[in-house]
Image: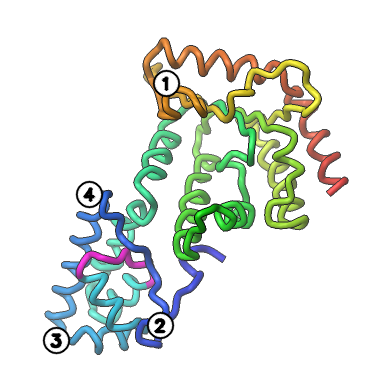
Amino acid sequence: MSVDEAGAGRGDYGADEPGWDVDPDDESGAAVVAAVGRQIKAWRESAGLRAGEFGAAIGYGEGLVYKVEGGRRIPRPEFLEKADEVLRAGGKLAAMKRDVAEVRYPKKIRELAKLEAQAVELSAYGSHDLHGLLQTEEYARALFGMRRPAFSQDEVERLVAARVARQSIFDRSPGPELSFVQEEVTLRRHLGGRMVLRRQLERLLEVGQLRNVEIQVMPTGRDDHAGMGGEMQVLKFRDGSAVGRSEGDFGSRPVSDPKYLRIVELRCGINRAQALTPRESPAFIEQVLGET
């Protein structure tokens, strides 16, 4: 079930309010949501409908209508579709789904997704859990659900949707070169339960068959390991520039300065050489799957 299907309470005058709260620190996103809200309000008033009448007509609560119109709540796609139909907007309101498609996700994730969408090469090492681009929806939901302090269910679904949306990178043509090194423990940790892990391992084997994707496993028994500093990632772009990030180094912030970037690239390269080869790794994953 997608985030757009989950928790969409209708017809109960707002006992459940589908959508997402606006991040006050996300100025650009807040501006988009406010503009969409003003347009909805203008169409509603032009149709001569009160907020409660409009909410009843589209199957949502009056309180949610006020929040959306006031720019305090990001509407789900179905809200805009129903609003367009009831207000006879001729597709103008429904078209705003494109405007809110990105801002419904946290700003930090939008920025990461933008970089991934522009990258021609990605190298990553995962030490604690599987890389976000490799995660199934249910694995991601289990992962976010166990964070402490706990996320609200609304925030969990928002983060899951954002993570799944990033995986459109696999649909790009031509696709970027994607290289992942995963610590063995990430294949064995039963996050979400045994069946969630089994389906996750099956997903790894499926994605690993793509010609532009290499998934390698770093066995726990390795004597030498360049990734002991934690997770790291390097993104390279068509113009020759690159961005890297290494957990615990440089304040864990993305870096593009060549002297810092060289360190991350060096570690990623050595890490790949120390892991099982791309040919050996699928057999290892299949073995773990058989044991799970």
Q: Secondary structure at mark 1?
A: strand
Q: Which residue is mark 4?
A: 27
Measured as percent of width and height from the top left, residue 203 is found at 69, 46
> Residue type at mark 4?
Glu
Is disc 1 surrounded by few (<14), some (14 to 19) or many (20+) residues within 10 Å? many
Give how far apart the Cα atoms at labels 1 and 2 are. 47 Å
Q: Which residue is mark 3?
A: 48
Residues at badges 2 and 4 in contact (C-beta under 8 Å)? Answer: no
Point out which mark residue 242 bears.
1
First in residue order: circle 4 vs circle 3: 4
Q: Quadrant of residue 180?
A: top right
Residues at marks 4 and 3, CA–CA distance in whole angstroms: 32 Å
Q: Earlier in the sequence, mark 1 or mark 2?
A: 2
How many angstroms separate mark 2 from mark 4 (CA)? Answer: 29 Å
Looking at numbered disc 1 in the image, what kind of residue is underneath it? Ala
Residue, x 64% and y 53% (percent of image)? 139
**SS at mark 4?**
helix
Q: Quadrant of the N terminus?
A: bottom right
Amino acid carrying mark 2 in the image? Ala
Where disc 3 sits, the SS reads: loop
Question: In the image, what residue occupies the spot 13% across and 80% down?
Answer: 45
The residue that disc 2 covers is: 15
> Dot 2 lies on which element?
loop
The magenta region covers 70-78
Question: Are dots 1 and 4 in contact, CB under 8 Å?
Answer: no
Q: Badge 4: how crowded within 10 Å, few (<14), some, or many (20+)?
A: few
